Image (tube, coloured by chain):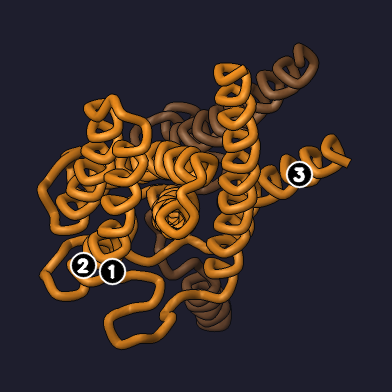
């Protein structure tokens, strides 16, 4: 069953890559094939956002039940989300190099994603700085909950209240999806693949951390 | 002759109408170098493949580590 799911996900991903290059029409106003990056860059950023919310969910569960496996689940979600956020930043910088001539321009979008990375980088640093397990878990859980307010602000509000060279969001400032239907299909299909990959990795990582913790305790 | 010019003009108009709205992307048969330059199809394709492959390899690594731990215990 697991092998079948892995093949299904791999096949879906292959289909998404094919569709991004050969099914979706070229976007107006983009240089070369740069618009094709967005079918991967945007879902990576969305998945990072979901991962940080999943971490907040585990943190709430930790604070209400004080069970260490919930703390381990939260850190797992944040670590994977951090990687997704980093990949979104890198793909965004590559796109900026093609479109704007520079990898980094301190555009509000670029600045806000860097602030999100710093915020969650600080979460990981905080965990490394507190030796007491209970205290670390408690502080980290509260910090991850603050992330619920920080992440949407930087992901969704800053780009809408500032002037940016970045293309309009999928749901634009007028609250409408102004995009070709084939482009939207590929974008959503890519998001489904990234999300499935994230939840699978998170599930395995959580189980792995629990196993290691159990082995260390015994 | 006038008819030929008329047909030619009509064909040009039809070709222009059939052309994609954004001519920025090179044609499928573009030169090899065009594919691999910054923003070319090959270049972006490779970046995407690296990302997807990396994520899948990480998934497989997690799976194999978990299986090894489960076997040990």
Q: Do circles 1 and 3 both sit on a common chain?
A: yes
- Image location (x, y in percent) of residue A49: 40, 57
Seen in the picture, residue A167 relative to A8 is either above or below; the reply is: below
Q: Quadrant of the C terminus of chain A?
A: top right
* Circle 1: element type: helix
Chain B colour is brown
Residue at image position (43%, 27%) is B33
Chain A colour is orange
Q: Which mark is residue A11?
A: 3
Q: Earlier in the sequence, mark 1 or mark 3?
A: 3
- Image location (x, y in percent) of residue A197: 61, 44
- Image location (x, y in percent) of residue B4: 56, 76
* Circle 2: element type: helix
Can residue A97 be seen in the rendering of this structure?
no
Can residue A41 be seen in the rendering of this structure?
yes
Kindly report the distance in space between the C-alpha atoms of the residues bearing marks 1 and 3. 31 Å
Which residue bears the numbered disc 1? A156
**Crowding near the residue tagged with mark 3, few <14, some 14–19, many ≥20 C-alpha atoms within 10 Å:** few
Which residue bears the numbered disc 2? A159
Q: Do circles 3 and 2 both sit on a common chain?
A: yes
Q: Quadrant of the N terminus of chain A?
A: top right
Q: Tell whether A70 sits left or right of A88.
A: right
Residue at image position (11%, 69%) is A163
* Circle 3: element type: helix
């Amino acid at each position: 069953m697991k092998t079948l799911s892995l093949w299904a996900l791999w096949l879906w991903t292959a289909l998404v890559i094919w569709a991004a290059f050969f099914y979706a029409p070229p976007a107006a106003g983009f240089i070369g094939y740069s618009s094709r990056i967005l079918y991967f860059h945007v879902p990576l950023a969305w998945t990072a956002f979901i991962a940080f919310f999943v971490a907040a969910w585990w943190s709430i569960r930790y604070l209400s039940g004080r069970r260490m496996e919930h703390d381990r689940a939260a850190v797992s979600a944040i670590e994977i989300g951090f990687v997704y956020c980093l990949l979104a930043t890198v793909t965004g910088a590559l796109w900026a190099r093609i479109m704007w001539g520079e990898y980094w321009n301190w555009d509000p979008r670029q600045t806000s994603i860097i602030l999100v990375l710093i915020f969650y980088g600080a979460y990981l640093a905080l965990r490394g700085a507190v030796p007491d397990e209970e205290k670390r878990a408690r502080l980290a859980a509260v910090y991850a909950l603050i992330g619920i307010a920080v992440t949407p602000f930087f992901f969704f509000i800053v780009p809408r209240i500032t002037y940016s060279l970045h293309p309009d969001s999928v749901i634009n400032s007028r609250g409408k999806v102004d995009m070709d239907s084939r482009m939207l299909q590929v974008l959503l299909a890519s998001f489904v693949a990234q999300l499935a990959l994230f939840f699978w990795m998170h599930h395995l990582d959580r189980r792995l951390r629990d196993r290691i913790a159990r082995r260390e305790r015994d | 002759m006038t008819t030929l010019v008329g047909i030619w003009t009509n064909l040009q108009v039809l070709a222009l109408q059939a052309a994609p709205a954004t001519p920025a992307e090179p044609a499928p048969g573009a030169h090899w170098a065009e594919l691999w330059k910054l923003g070319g199809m090959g270049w972006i394709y490779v970046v995407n493949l690296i990302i997807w492959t990396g994520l899948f390899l990480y998934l497989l690594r997690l799976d194999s580590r978990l299986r090894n731990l489960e076997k040990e215990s």
